[in-house]
Image: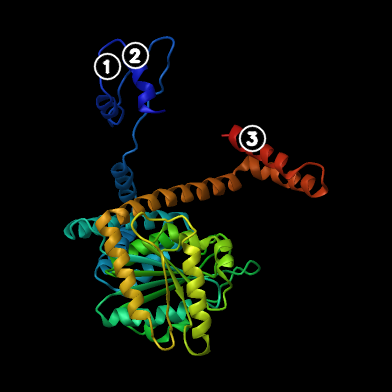
């Protein structure tokens, strides 16, 4: 119920509870104490209360056992101290599906978020880390590219974390986890951390907990976070909703500019990188660079101040990698100075809030007793062709909403 809609009715309330301004109303509705209202006969207003985040967190902390409290304290201090083992254990905790462990993970995340906010305050309100998403079709050379640019960044004094996502099998549910094997040198670098994770059926090329893993990596002191997604198709670019800069990697033989536009993902790219620009592929790489540069001019811009660029690189020779990182820094400085980077992060948080709401709502729907009772019979009738899938879905939704 919107505050602006409630206001005219509240003003007609007789008695000691009088509201004259929207600010006063908002303050009154958000009080934690119980407030008694007098209502006119024509209007009944249900008492509403604001959910205090601090109260919810304090309740979770109060419910912790001594063992759980010691665990979270150990993980938190190890994490902000830069211990790789604590970071790995913390990411494992947020990836779990165990209900109690998921609650513990949220308590840990709140502590890390408070620590990160303090770090950003000391940094003048600027983010302490820069997030880069890397996506592209299978065989584009994403892992090889990360190996080269990661080593270059660690030599420059940066701490780099790589969140590599591998596709899970639709048949067995397993995942190969081969990205870390390709990054042999970077995986041995003490200033780098590589975490492979399976998609576990999550669409969009990332896992549902990738966003939370980014927060943990930043809390551990990694100032560059690289998120490598699985090979993308037409619409798998959810990584663009969790990073500051979205980089699309394409091989020289990846099709013409029309294929790039059809793929749809190029509209989300802040930077397009033509990989494998060496040897016999230099000429095709230059042609693809020119074609994609022309294609980008036809697309609507994501940013008001930044025009996406197309750059060629070679992971084998390292040619073009320093120039590419200079372009990344130009993007970061431009977005920070204009304030677009902060706005983008705030928008992304809203997007992931609703993604998690939809995911949890679907899980509650699937586990609802009334849905479980009606589902087998409706599935049989749908498979026989007696009713349409749409009607079956409507019946299940009706059973879900009408049964407490």
Residue 70: mark: none
The residue carrying pointer 1 sits among few (fewer than 14), some (14 to 19) or many (20 or more) residues within 10 Å by Cα, namely: few
Question: To which residue does mark 1 refer?
Answer: 17
Dot 2 or dot 1, earlier in sequence: 1
Residue drawn at (40%, 48%), measured in percent from left and top? 350
Residue drawn at (38%, 50%), measured in percent from left and top? 347
250 lies left or right of 14 = right
Q: Residue 252 placed where, x, y %?
A: 53, 78
Question: To which residue does mark 3 refer?
Answer: 398
Dot 3 or dot 1, earlier in sequence: 1
Of residues 74 and 39, the one nearer the viewer is 39
Residue drawn at (43%, 84%), measured in percent from left and top? 315
229 lies left or right of 215 = right
67 lies left or right of 277 = left
The residue carrying pointer 2 sits among few (fewer than 14), some (14 to 19) or many (20 or more) residues within 10 Å by Cα, namely: some
Q: CA distance from mark 3 to mark 1?
A: 40 Å
Instruction: Quadrant for residue 107, please give it.
Output: bottom left
Of residues 54 and 226, the one nearer the viewer is 226
Of residues 341 and 222, the one nearer the viewer is 341
Marks 3 and 2 close (CB-CB < 8 Å):
no
Q: Quadrant of the C terminus?
A: top right
Q: Residue 32 placed where, x, y %?
A: 28, 32
Q: CA distance from mark 2 to mark 1?
A: 8 Å
Q: CA distance from mark 3 to mark 2?
A: 35 Å
Dot 3 or dot 2, earlier in sequence: 2
Question: To which residue does mark 2 refer?
Answer: 38
Q: Is residue 150 depicted above or below 388 in this figure?
A: below
């Amino acid at each position: 119920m919107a505050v602006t809609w409630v206001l005219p009715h509240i003003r007609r309330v007789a008695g000691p509870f009088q509201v004259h301004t929207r600010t006063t109303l908002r303050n009154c509705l958000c009080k934690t104490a119980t407030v008694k209202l007098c209502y006119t006969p024509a209007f009944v207003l249900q008492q509403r209360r604001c959910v205090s985040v601090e109260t919810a967190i304090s309740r979770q902390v109060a419910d912790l056992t001594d063992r759980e409290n010691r665990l979270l304290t150990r993980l938190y201090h190890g994490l902000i101290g830069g211990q790789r083992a604590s970071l790995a254990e913390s990411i494992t905790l947020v990836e779990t599906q165990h209900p109690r462990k998921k609650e513990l993970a949220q308590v840990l995340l709140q502590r890390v978020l408070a620590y990160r906010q303090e770090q950003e305050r000391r940094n003048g309100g600027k983010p302490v880390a820069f997030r880069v998403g890397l996506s592209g079709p299978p065989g584009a050379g994403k892992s090889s590219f990360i190996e080269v640019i990661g080593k270059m960044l660690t030599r420059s004094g940066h701490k780099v974390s790589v969140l590599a996502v591998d596709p899970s099998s639709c048949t067995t549910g397993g995942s190969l986890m081969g990205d870390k094997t390709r990054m042999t040198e970077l995986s041995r670098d003490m200033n780098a951390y590589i975490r492979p994770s399976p998609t576990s059926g999550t669409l969009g090329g990332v896992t549902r907990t990738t966003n939370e893993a980014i927060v943990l990596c930043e809390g551990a002191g990694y100032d560059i976070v690289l998120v490598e997604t699985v090979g993308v198709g037409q619409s798998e670019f959810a990584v663009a909703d969790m990073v500051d800069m979205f980089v699309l990697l394409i091989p020289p033989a990846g099709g013409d500019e029309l294929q790039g536009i059809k793929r749809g993902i190029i509209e989300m790219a802040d930077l397009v990188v033509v990989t494998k620009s060496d040897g016999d592929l230099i000429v095709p790489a230059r042609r693809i660079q020119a074609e994609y540069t022309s294609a980008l001019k036809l697309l609507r811009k994501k940013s008001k101040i930044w025009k996406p660029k197309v750059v060629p690189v070679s992971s084998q020779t390292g040619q073009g990698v320093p120039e590419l990182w200079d372009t990344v820094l130009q993007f970061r400085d431009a977005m920070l100075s204009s304030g677009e980077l902060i706005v983008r992060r705030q928008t992304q948080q809203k997007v992931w809030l609703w993604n998690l709401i939809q995911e949890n709502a679907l899980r509650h729907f699937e586990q609802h007793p009334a849905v479980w009772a009606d589902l087998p019979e409706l599935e049989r009738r749908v498979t026989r062709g007696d009713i349409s899938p749409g009607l079956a879905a409507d019946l299940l939704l009706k059973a879900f909403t009408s049964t407490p």
